[in-house]
Amino acid sequence: MFTVSWRLADGATGDVEVRGRDRFSFGRHGCTVDLDVPGLSREALVIRDTAPGPVVFRGQRDNGAFVALVTLLGQRRWIEQGTAANLTADVNRVELHLGGEVVFLADVSFGIRPRTFERLLPEPAPTA
């Protein structure tokens, strides 16, 4: 499980808890968080649960957009179109820049991570 605390350029904010095989998505239509602006792809960003930390997929087409993972110290690592990168304890912020403006920002919080297959196993039945 992980939590996405997001903020849009217009000041809208929210928190979304993501569990199991669910995912968080940001884009134009049909996403967890929608924003209808020119140049934004339908699924610009997708964050899924994986080990060792959640993974960010950049689906955003260029259109002058830049996607960055941001460290706790504010350093940015840019993600190319069609690629993915893991979040870590030190890198837990995602930004999407469009037209020179940060249109989406997300802080992702998560705890100690078991391996992927361990998280997907069913809960053991209680013993009597």
Image (cartoon, rainbow, N blue to C red):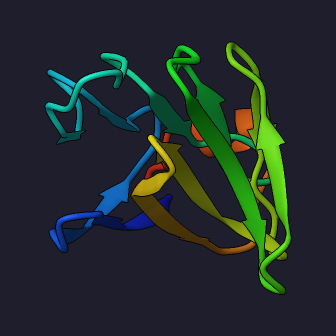
Residue at x-position 78% and y-position 83%: 72
Residue 39 image point, x, y percent: 34, 21
Q: Residue 41 versus residue 19: which sits nearer the camera?
A: 41
In the current view of this chain or complex, which residue is farthest to the bottom?
A: 73
Residue occupying image coordinates x 21% and y 72%: 13
Is the residue 39 above or below the residue 22 in the image?
above
Residue 39, placed above or below residue 75 = above
Q: Image check: 1 left or right of 35?
A: right
On screen, residue 41 above or below 76: above
Name the residue at 69% across, 18% down: 81
Left/right of residue 91 with respect to residue 125 in the rendered view: right
The quadrant the C terminus occupies is: bottom left
Residue nearest the observer in this picture, 55 or 10: 10
Q: Is residue 127 visible?
A: no
Q: Could you say where residue 110 lies in the image, as x and y percent from the top left? A: 61, 70
For residue 49, what is the image quadrant? top right
| 120 horizontally vs 106: left or right | right
Q: Is residue 46 positioned above or below 75 on the image? A: above
- Asked whether the viewer can see residue 89, the reply is yes
Which quadrant would residue 12 be assigned to in this image?
A: bottom left
Q: Residue at x 14, y 31 (%)?
A: 36
Q: Position of residue 10 (x, y in %)?
A: 17, 65
* x and y, in percent, of residue 127 in the image: 48, 61
